[in-house]
Image (tube, grey):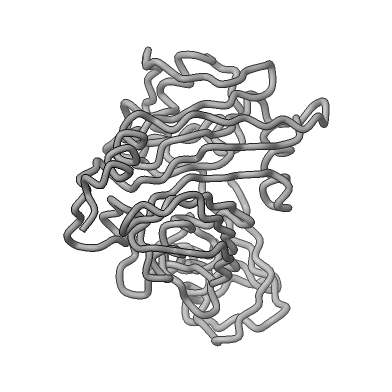
Amino acid sequence: MRTITLHVLNPNNLRIDKYISENAEEISRSYAADLCGTGKVIVSGRAADKKYKPADGEVIEIELPEPESLDLTAENIPLDIVYEDDDVIVVNKPQGMVVHPAAGNTHGTLVNALLYHCGENLSAINGVIRPGIVHRIDKDTAGLLIVAKNNDAHLALSEQLKERKASRRYYALVNGRISEDGTVNKPIARHPKDRKKMAVVKGGREAVTHYRVLENLGGYTLLECILETGRTHQIRVHMASLGHSLVGDRAYGIAKEKIKTEGQLLFAKTIGFNHPKTGEYMEFTADLPDYFEKILNKLRGSDYRA
């Protein structure tokens, strides 16, 4: 049994099932309602009904059942390992690879590859489904991820991410011309109508993205995006909210792209953190993948310019 604790700030007077879904990213509203129905959501020592509206200052405790055990298979999938020691691995994940298994998708993931490479030397905090996984990037986002090889390392790295002490910088190619650097500070929560998507939502979780213009390429802009927070789909949602969606983003982008891609042009280029055992600051940077570089070079040659 795992417990998630939420300290309530509920200015919109949301029902508890909706409040949970907007503040605990891994829990959908329907799942929150199910948890309320089975007495797994506790407020002030009492089980809460799904229609209950929590007040500011209250504490919600959500008891999550252990994840269903999936029959995970170690698979000999090549990994691009940028760094590894007894505590951490930094992996350069390719575009198209899912980070961890889910029901109906138990093969070909980063976790399957890590199980083959590391055996039992992965943290167990996130259960059998996500061994070693401290943070995630989307299937169609490539780039650097930190993996924990033991529970102490996992806890230390998670705390750095929570306290915004880790550094995460992405390269993103967006539609339209952006001339100045800037910051997007807009709260993010589940999309009110499409639960598979995220959106800028009043009362959502704080989300802050800084961006720096690297290059203007006709009707496109290459940005460096620096995450201050790490919400699901944060860069994709924030840039779309400015009218500058990521090229190739099927969920948040434009309907007819001139540039044909296998997914959004977003790359986790740099990651920095204090080593969980030594405390030494470490930073790693990866080269842009070939498919990303080829598109940039075509843009520099005006192939896609209107």
* Residue at screen point 26% across, 55% down: 250
Return the residue nearer the eye: 14 or 66.
14
Q: Is residue 109 left or right of residue 19?
A: left
* Residue at screen point 42% across, 28% down: 110
Q: Is residue 32 left or right of residue 299?
A: right
Q: Is residue 210 left or right of residue 193?
A: right
* Residue at screen point 76% across, 35% down: 274
**37 versus 98 height, above or below:** below
Q: Position of residue 143 (x, y in %)?
A: 47, 35
Quarter placement of the C terminus: bottom left
Q: Residue lying farthest front? A: 301
Quarter holding residue 169: top right
Return the residue nearer the eye: 302 or 255.
302
* Residue at screen point 62% across, 18% down: 84
Q: Is residue 285 left or right of residue 279?
A: left
Return the residue nearer the eye: 95 or 294.
294
Q: Position of residue 198 (x, y in %)?
A: 40, 64
Q: Position of residue 204 (x, y in %)?
A: 53, 72
**33 versus 300 height, above or below:** below
Picture mark count = 0
Q: Position of residue 109 (x, y in %)?
A: 37, 29
Return the residue nearer the eye: 133 or 20.
133
**67 versus 226 height, above or below:** above
